[in-house]
Image (spheres, helix red, strand yellow):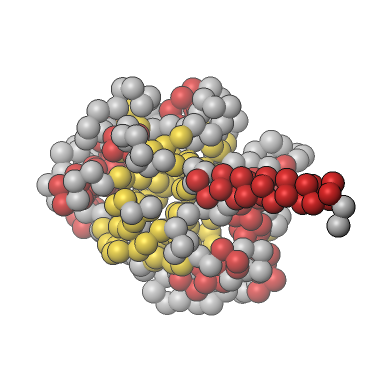
Amino acid sequence: MKKSAIILSALLLMFSGIACAGQKGSTRNYVIGFYNLENLFDIYDDPAKNDEEFLPEGKNQWTEAKYQKKVSNMAKVIKAMKDDNGRYHTILGVSEIENRLVLEDLVSDPQIADANYQIVHYDGPDRRGVDVALLYKPEQFTYLDSESIPFDFNDTEVEITLDKEAQDYFRTRDILMVHGLIDGEHFAIYVTHLPSRIGGKGQDLRSRGAEIIYKHSRIMEERYPGIKTVVMGDMNDNPTDDSQAVWLHGRRTIEETRPGEFFDPFTIMLEDGYGSLAYQGEWNIYDIIQVNYNLAVAPQGGLRIRPIVKNKYYGRVFKKPFMTQQSGQYKGTPFRTFSGGAFIGGYSDHYPTYIVISK
């Protein structure tokens, strides 16, 4: 071998070693997100659930082909987020799913099967038959325990408008809490889908849901001092509404956030015109992710939330052209599954949101 070739080989080996060392010592990012999957029902009748519209003979004529298209579309979005970030979500909370079966079909879709997502799900009491759930990568998140927290009216400080009979009849999604470790640090992840705004009602109910989450998170902080908490979900409220700003103690900036409070990265994003769903021509961010003080203001060497959009925003609303209506009355809004009662083969009426944490 010529001398020049030997020198070139040595240089290549040296630079290769430097590159590998840099990768081993580089900061590792963890993506934590939420996605409302908009009525991900299977095609089978479940007498315990109100799923009549989502049956082959039902109003939506929910056939196997439509179901498979829906599952594939949801997987396509998750894969697109992975391609954008260079990594799968460590944790992805989801809502509007019928049962564990649809989640198993989703995580085994060929587009995302290599993520090896594990599932945390409980069947809940919601009258419409939808639940929340959490998907996680076991290589990055060590599952310890979980709890399905019921929505009730016990010991509330919220002024509830429902009378006692209506309270006893009321049913909605339970709140999912998953406790585990990321990079050796304790995390409590809450996934919720707060009560609907249909009919212009429910502000007190959404505030009550936020109160339940906040009180439970304080118990977890007492049990595991320094625990890092993430609250995510379809809040059916904006970051500035009472449920988020008052009852969940969400703050607009990290600098304003104090121990016992949460930082809401989507408050400023809403002010600046971002949205995760549109209603009557107005953009909202109902798909909110808040982090507690311990995750917002972590000491050097600890996991903390990082800016990810324009090095300014600490959250992201993820949208791509294929997820967006390209024509017609709803041009520019999320490309949903149904429109005017007709199946149009879209994705969801919500865009997913996420945050990034690292040391």
325 w.r.t. 98: above or below? above
The number of callouts visible is: 0
Residue 244 position, x and y percent, is 33, 35
Residue 30 position, x and y percent, is 47, 48
Which residue is depicted at the point 15% across and 47% down? 222
From this viewpoint, which residue is outermost toward the left? 155
Q: Is residue 128 visible?
A: no
19 w.r.t. 253: above or below? below
Q: Is residue 278 visible?
A: yes
From this viewpoint, which residue is outermost toward the right? 2
Which residue is depicted at the point 35% across and 45% down? 230
Which residue is depicted at the point 21% across and 35% down? 260
Depth check: 54 or 96 in front? 96
Q: Quadrant of the N terminus?
A: bottom right
Which residue is depicted at the point 21% across and 57% down? 168
Depth check: 277 or 20 in front? 20
Question: In the visual, does 301 lie left or right of 157?
Answer: right
Q: Quadrant of the C terminus?
A: top left
301 w.r.t. 70: above or below? above
Depth check: 239 or 56 in front? 239
Residue 85 in which image quadrant = top right
83 w.r.t. 266: above or below? below
Residue 295 position, x and y percent, is 33, 39
Residue 352 position, x and y percent, is 54, 46
